């Protein structure tokens, strides 16, 4: 396996005339959890879209050596808000879509395909609602379904666009467990987040604000200087212990938006803790 | 003749032109129900309605210049789709604005062209409302081919259409080529509309395109089931419409188109009543 999952060199990503990410160079290590963090409209999802092959750079290069040129080896869990809930479709049908990258248009589902679908639903704790309609589920259950869809797909890279935003504690815990199980088997996980503490607990961080401000280990990236550059000084404050925290009015209810928690081992602090704040 | 007696049911179909109307209408209903399911699910009803009316100038031009009306209708559909795409790509307007512009423009152009023909009122009425009882054997053969093509394409492209309806980006990520699938769906809708307009007319073809799938979606919960039930409702609508029009002496095409819409509201009312009575009563507070 390549040591580097993604390599970007002087890359610019744009939607028409609107530049979302400007002239940035960064790497994403393979087999680790990388978080992409930054303010709203900073270009977080754009980076995922480019890695997934949904858009091509207008300048520079972005290579994904971990997949050997086959973008179907990337499972991308989109934001739940981007789905057409008017579509009458069951949970198992949604998860089965993940297998279409392998089966193509016509091949019948094999026993392997069905096992992958059932395994993904079991891992995400949604096997008991497999025949339920997607539109009848809660927000948290829907997020589990979308993650299960990604897991059912044969993949080397798992992309998650704000997977922990606006969900319940058990769902956040289930997704967090899956993320770390994926890296245990050598998969690369890249996720966007608004949550500084979530970024602190990842292996690698990309801090973005119209460009990649900094990338590397959390302690090197999430410094006061870098955060002020990304978010502006008005959103960063010092608490009574002289520790930084982010006060983002765009996400007043975001769990764990304060980045001043003591960094502990993963088992001691997880997304489920985050929601208790 | 007794209401719902065997004779009451069979009399409307004793003559050859009535039988051809039933067969032709049923074949049109099958094609329209299949493509109409995606129209309803993907929220493309306005585009479908616009497309139904957008073919009028092509038909009018074919009448004026004396060439095949199906070719004219297909050309008009292509012009309309290109126009919608052009406005959508060149401006910041949402797609419904570009659809609205082309919708009115094409329909207006169609009426202007028809007004230059000798039998203005007759031609316009036939284009808009069709002539179910004027279906010929050649029309049935054409509708048979159309129905077969629609069924085959619907089966072959089921997965791309399904994922495209779920999320376009997901379709692209899975390698299902959503733009090509979308174009194929638009072509299928156009073909179904154009092939069916002679039976129920451009104005009323929309009733069979949207009515049966919308009604079916109220009753069943999966796309293949909606398609199957929509086909049954569409074919029944044609049969019931022809029966009612025969006994009530009303326009066959218009009656066919009204039946699925009426059925939709009957089913909606039934479902609302069922939900109302199924809801648990509030528990009275203890004194």
Image (tube, helix red, strand yellow):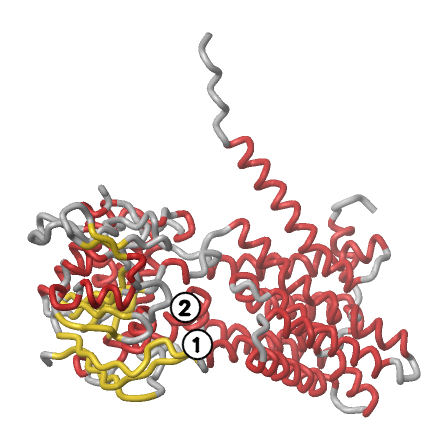
Name the residue tied to disc 1: B178
State whether discs 2 and 1 lie on one chain. Answer: yes
CB under 8 Å between callouts 2 and 1?
yes
Q: Disc 2 versus disc 1: distance between alpha carbons?
A: 8 Å
Q: Secondary structure at mark 2?
A: helix
Name the residue tied to disc 2: B163
In the rendered image, residue A53, in percent from the top left (x then y), is placed at 31, 79
In the rendered image, residue A146, in percent from the top left (x then y), is placed at 31, 59
- Residue found at x 24% / y 73%: A213
Q: How many marks?
A: 2
Mark 1 surroundings within 10 Å by alpha-carbon count, few (fewer than 14), some (14 through 19), many (20 or more): many
In the rendered image, residue B167, in percent from the top left (x then y), is placed at 42, 67
Q: Chain of mark 2?
A: B
Front residue of this view, candidates A29 and A17: A17
Q: Chain of mark 1?
A: B
In the rendered image, residue A78, in percent from the top left (x then y), is placed at 34, 64
| Up-down relation of residue B86 to residue A116 (above or below) | below
Front residue of this view, candidates B271 and B252: B271
- Residue found at x 43% / y 67%: B162
């Amino acid at each position: 396996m390549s040591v580097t999952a993604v390599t970007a060199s002087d890359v610019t990503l744009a939607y028409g005339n609107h530049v979302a990410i400007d002239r940035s160079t960064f790497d994403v290590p393979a087999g680790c959890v990388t978080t992409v963090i930054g303010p709203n409209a900073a270009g977080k999802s754009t980076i995922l879209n480019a890695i997934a092959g949904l858009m091509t750079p207008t300048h520079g290069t972005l290579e994904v050596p971990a997949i050997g040129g086959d973008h179907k080896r990337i499972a991308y869990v989109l934001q739940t808000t981007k789905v057409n809930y008017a579509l009458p479709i069951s949970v198992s049908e949604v998860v089965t879509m993940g297998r279409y990258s392998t089966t193509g248009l016509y091949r019948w589902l094999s026993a392997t395909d069905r096992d992958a679908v059932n395994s993904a639903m079991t891992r995400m704790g949604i096997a008991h609602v497999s025949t339920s309609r997607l539109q009848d589920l809660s927000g948290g259950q829907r997020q589990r379904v979308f993650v299960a869809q990604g897991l059912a797909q044969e993949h080397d890279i798992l992309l998650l666009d704000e997977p922990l935003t606006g969900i319940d504690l058990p769902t956040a815990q289930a997704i967090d467990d899956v993320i770390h199980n994926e890296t245990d088997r050598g998969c690369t996980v890249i996720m966007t987040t608004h949550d500084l503490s979530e970024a602190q607990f990842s292996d690698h961080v990309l801090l973005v604000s119209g460009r990649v401000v900094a990338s590397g280990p959390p302690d090197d990236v999430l410094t006061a200087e870098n955060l002020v550059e990304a978010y502006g000084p008005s959103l960063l404050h010092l608490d009574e212990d002289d520790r930084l925290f982010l006060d983002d009015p765009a996400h007043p209810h975001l769990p764990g938006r304060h980045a001043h928690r003591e960094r502990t081992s993963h088992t001691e602090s997880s997304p489920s803790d985050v929601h208790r704040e | 003749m007794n209401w719902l007696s065997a004779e009451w049911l069979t009399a409307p179909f004793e003559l050859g032109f009535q039988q051809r109307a039933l067969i032709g209408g049923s074949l049109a209903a099958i094609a329209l129900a299949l493509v109409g399911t995606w129209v309803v699910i993907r929220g493309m009803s306005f585009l479908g309605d616009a497309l139904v009316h957008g073919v009028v100038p092509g038909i009018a031009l074919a009448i004026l210049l004396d060439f095949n009306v199906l070719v004219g209708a297909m050309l008009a559909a292509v012009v309309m789709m290109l126009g919608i795409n052009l406005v959508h790509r060149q401006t910041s307007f949402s797609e419904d604005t570009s659809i609205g512009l082309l919708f009115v423009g094409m329909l207006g152009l169609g009426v202007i062209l028809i007004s230059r023909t000798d039998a203005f009122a007759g031609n316009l009425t036939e284009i808009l409302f069709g002539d179910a009882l004027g279906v010929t054997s050649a029309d049935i053969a054409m509708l048979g081919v159309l129905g077969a093509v629609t069924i085959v394409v619907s089966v072959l492209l089921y997965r791309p259409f399904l994922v495209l309806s779920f999320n376009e980006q997901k379709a692209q990520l899975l390698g299902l080529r959503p733009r090509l699938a979308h174009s194929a769906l638009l072509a299928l809708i156009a073909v179904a509309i154009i092939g069916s307009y002679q039976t129920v007319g451009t104005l009323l073809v929309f009733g069979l395109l949207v009515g049966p799938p919308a009604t079916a979606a109220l009753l069943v919960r999966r796309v293949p089931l909606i398609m199957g039930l929509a086909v049954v409702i569409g074919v029944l609508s044609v049969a019931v419409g022809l029966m009612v029009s025969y006994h009530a002496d009303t326009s066959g095409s218009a009656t066919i188109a009204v039946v699925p819409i009426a059925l939709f509201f009957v089913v909606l009312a039934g479902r609302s009543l069922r939900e109302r009575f199924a809801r648990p009563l509030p528990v009275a507070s203890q004194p």
